[in-house]
Amino acid sequence: MIPRIKSIQAAKDYQLIVTFDNGICVIYDVAEDIRNIKAFAPLMTEHRLFENFQLDQSRTCIYWNEQIDLPSDTILEYGKRI
């Protein structure tokens, strides 16, 4: 089953604090993606784009625009549990 996101908060240094419906909470480091995935570069270069994320209707993906998104299962797998 694909994990559903309950809430998201932007944190310092391009990190997201993500809480899932099952109560698991993780910090996901988007800075790594910005460094390694060319499409993510605008999150650092376009003013305030990083803070303007949205959650899709199914609550299984965070996105910033049509080119930049993060699926919930990736966030859960690679995020650090807190």
Image: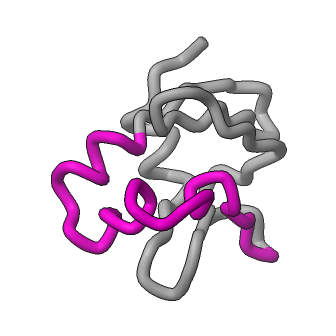
- Please state if 22 lies on the left or on the right of 71 as rendered: right
Q: Work out whether 51 lies above or below 54.
A: above
Rendered view: 30 above or below 71: above
39 sits left or right of 74 in the view: left
Which residue, as the protein is rendered here, is positioned at the far top?
82
**Is the N terminus in the top left, top right, bottom left or bottom right quadrant?**
bottom right
Above or below, comparing residue 38 to residue 30 in the picture: below
In which quadrant will I find the C terminus? Answer: top right
Q: Quadrant of residue 7?
A: top right
Q: Is residue 70 visible?
A: yes
Name the colouring of the figure: one colour
**Residue beneath the point at 51% across and 87% down:** 66
- Residue 14, x across and y down, in percent: 48, 38
Q: From the viewer's perspective, is 18 left or right of 38?
A: right
Magenta span contains residue 76 = no
Boundaries of the magenta span = 30-57
Instruction: Tell me, yes or no, if residue 1 can be seen here.
Output: no
Query: How many numbered callouts?
Result: 0
Residue 33 x, y percent position in the rendering: 29, 51
Tell me the residue at 41%/44% (across/down).
30
Q: Position of residue 48 (x, y in %)?
A: 62, 58
Q: Position of residue 5 (x, y in %)?
A: 74, 49
Q: Which residue does the image show at 72% across and 53% down from the upper left? A: 4
What is the residue that sits farthest to the bottom in this orientation?
66
Q: Predominant secondary structure in magenta?
A: helix
Query: Viewer-proximal residue, 2 or 17?
Result: 17
Q: Is residue 44 magenta?
A: yes
